[in-house]
Amino acid sequence: MSPALRVLFVTSEIAPWQKTGGLGDISSALPEALARAGVEVRILVPAYPALPLAFPDARPIAEIPPPGGRLPASRLLQAATPGGVPLLLLDCPACFERPGGPYQSPRGGDWPDNALRFGLLSRVAALLASNASPLVWRPDILHCNDWQSALAPAYLHYLHGGGAATVMTIHNLAFQGLFPPSTLADLGLPQSAFVFDGVEFYGHLSCLKAGLQFADRITTVSPTYAREIQQAELGFGLDGLLRHRSAVLSGILNGVDARWNPATDPLLTKHYDAQHLAAKEANRRALRAELGLIGDVTAPLLAVVSRLTHQKGMDLLLAIADQLLDGPAEAQLVVLGNGERGFEAGLRALAARHPGRVAAMIGFDERLAHRIEAGADIFLMPSRFEPCGLNQLYSLRYGTPPVVRATGGLADTVTDCTPEALRAGLATGFVFGPPDASALLAAASRAIDAWGKRRLWRRLQRNGMSMDFSWAKAAADYLDVYRAARAARDIAAASGPEYNGG
């Protein structure tokens, strides 16, 4: 048998210990799925305060001296996830031992030294993927995720002259890691890197561009998003580079991990599956009681679990919420999330106008998110763009048909409830096109009307619950990308030093 493929998976988040969104979930689930597929995978993640607490027996395995520029010294601690995947914790208290989230202070502003913090993560990732690694274990593939680790392929190119093959995954192109030109020296990169076909981007240093420029293969988290980011509207200035590298760009849908399963979820009042949907009602009753909703118990319960931002279409939701709530069905609404202060205030005001019929939970509570998916009737995701989206996948699995905009992963995973799709057994939710309030209102109204037709609604629920969004499928697709990246790197090794990725 050939030796197992060795992959170093580099991430700035990992659930449940440090998470701001889907990246944290993916960074837990995908490596475990890869390990089950026979890959020898390690996860490199900063040692935020929650991680040493979760793994008090983590042992030091390497000391890393200051690697250049203003990057500090660090060390590696080794632990293992509950699923058995080796975990490499990048221990640097000056960078990562602080309150707040991974990117922002408790007051909500970006940490001013984010370039150095995640430059260090990228630099250490590149070191471990090079012949200069202090570890015996060497990866075949360095898998980077979003801007926080995207400098690693550039470090390999400029400082090591190559190393492991590299894969760059875009989870959201809107976040690019842009910093002033002076940051180049702080990060220990040569001045020659600050060029059009290097890390320079409209007079700034762009971490994400570096990864897209130098990685052997580029992936993003849905096929539709892979096409969308090659156009100016959603390309955020990088569409030209992505079109140039389209031959090595692919979209792979995220999966849903085993924690999101209504048949086994320990956070639910009562378990259920596609053949026992009547049991979902117990979760609905429990959720209404927990949130203090009153009034007609037969009214449809709509739900949102989201960051409260313009990207997520929260302005569209606020524009139509009163109409939905005052409509003939007398719908009720629960929203869980935090984000822009104006949207938080708008939701609080909405709840004040509709006491007992709107629950606006400002903040995030993953346990409550599970109960909302199980207890709601209809899930709303009016995103202006959505690289993949996870909540629509959770909603489908929990028999809570979603209302989504036709963009990114939402378009790839939800089939509109048309007569034709119903007859074919394909309909799973409600899809609208233009990113405007009237289109959202029309789609939500269609969903409420369908919810009142019990037999039709059961068909929708079962269609969604039967879909396969397993991580096993995603892992197989990533394996194909890894093999292509390694083949490209092998060709590069035979082609000389001018190879530039892809």
Image: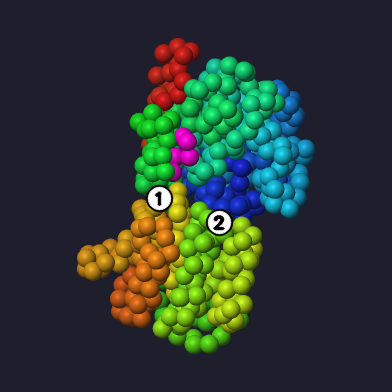
Give the dominant element type of the magenta stretch: helix, strand or loop. Answer: loop
Q: Eyeballing the image, is 308 above or below 177?
A: below
- Tell whether 183 sits left or right of 146: right
Q: Is residue 327 visible?
A: yes
Pick the quarter of the image with the N terminus: top left
Give the left or right position of residue 275, taking residue 174 as reference: left
* Residue 302 percent location from the top left of the image: 47, 73
Q: Earlier in the sequence, mark 1 or mark 2?
A: 2
Residue 214 belongs to magenta span = no
Q: Which residue is mark 1?
A: 408
The residues tagged by marks 1 and 2 sit, at their Cα atoms, a distance apart of: 17 Å
At x 45% / y 75%, what residue is drawn? 324
Q: Is residue 193 above or below residue 109?
A: above
Residue 458 image offset from top left, x and y in percent: 34, 75
Q: Which residues are magenta?
A: 234-238
Q: Disc 2 marks which amino acid?
A: Thr
Mark 1 or mark 2: which is in front?
A: 2
Q: Tell me residue 240's x, y (percent).
A: 41, 32
Residue nearest the viewer, comparing 83 with 24: 24
In this rendering, the answer to whether 402 lies above or below 30 is: below
Label 2: few (<14), some (14–19) or many (≥20) C-alpha neighbours in 10 Å = some
Q: Secondary structure at mark 1?
A: helix
Q: Amino acid at mark 1?
A: Gly
- Disc number for residue 372: none
State the image coordinates of residue 333 (x, y, percent, origin top left).
Answer: 52, 74
Residue at the far top: name it: 496
Q: Which quadrant of the view contains residue 436? A: bottom left
